[in-house]
Structures are given as C-alpha cells and as structure tokens.
Image: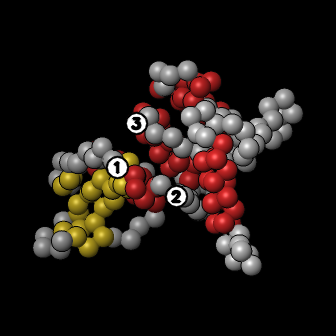
Amino acid sequence: MFKWAKTLLKKLFKREKAILAFSPKIKVEQRVPSKDELALGWAFGYDEKTDERVYQLKGINQKYRETHFYTIGASGTGKTKFLEYLIKQDIKNGEGFGVIDPHGDLIEDVKGWLYFYSSKSLEDNIILIEPTNPNAIVSFNPLEKIKGISPEEQAGELVEVFKKIWSDAWGA
C-alpha cells in the first residue's frame, strides 16, 4: 500500500524529476501505459512499510475522456503543457480530439504536430474553426442529405435530438 504525499505540481515535475534521474536509491515502478490509457505523468509517495519514496507513472483510461476533460489552474502552472502532452499522445494513437484555444498559441503547435505525426492528409482529418477568418465559415445544416442514411431515418434522428433538448416541453 502507498500513502501518497501531497505536493505542488511544480515541485513534482521539476525538482523531483531531476532527483529521479540522478539517484539510484529511489524506487521507480516501471510501467508503460496500456493501449487504452494516456500517461499523465509521475506521482510520488511513500511505501507504508519502509517509508521509502516510490515513484509511479499515472494514467487515465480513455473511457473517462469520452465526454469532457476539464483542466484548471492558476496562470503559469502548466495547464497548456499538460494538454500538449495529452494531445501529442492522441495524435500518435490516431485518436480524435477538440481544442478551444482563445489565445491562438496552442493551435499553431497542434497543427505542426499533426503534420509531423500524421500520415493521413490533414485536409481530410481536421476541421479548423477560426471565427476571426471570414473566408473560413463553418456551417451546420441538420437537413443536409447524409450519404447512406434515408431521409426518414435522418428526420427521425433529428426529432430525437429535439426531444432530448426540449424534453420538458415535448408533447405538452
């Protein structure tokens, strides 16, 4: 059993990482993230029996990322670097992701990584929404014919969406 130490991320990922690299006395759990898991970084704690410091790679299962992933923290605490780390893993694993970047810095890096890591044509795999670019307007037409789906089935799906959105008023 481990009792995990409470620490600041700054300390964990800067000073402690250096200790991990140069000290042969520290026990490290060697573990590669599983196929359906993304690595989050290293955490450290203490072995309850020996009180020895132990490092362990932490990860998050993909099923927990199927809805939303919310990253919060004060300025300069590494939120963007953390997201960069996850995005690079998603690109390498061929997973889809969405980024809302109000500052515009992260998206430029993401485009570079997609070009570097992706073997597929970027035009076929990326929808870049730039509200400030009047030449790149993204439209959404729920009545547009979808290949391989009958108009009746498509209309039925649209009605189901409306029922979910306005369930309290449906059929009243």
Position of residue 92 in the picture relative to residue 20 (left or right): right
Give the mark toward the camera: 1 or 2: 2
The tag earlier along the polypeptide, 2 or 3, is 2
Q: Nearer the viewer, mark 2 or mark 3?
A: 2
Q: Is residue 81 above or below residue 47?
A: above
The residue that mark 1 highlights is: 37
Residue 53 occupies quadrant: bottom left
Residue type, mark 1 in image: Glu
Q: Is residue 56 left or right of residue 70?
A: left
Q: Which residue is mark 3?
A: 93
Which image quadrant for residue 59?
bottom left
How far, Cα to Cα, is label 1 from label 2? 15 Å
Classify 137 as above or below 4: above
Q: Nearer the viewer, residue 66 or 81?
A: 66
Q: Position of residue 79 (x, y in %)?
A: 56, 53
Q: Which residue is mark 2?
A: 67
Q: Amino acid at mark 3?
A: Asn
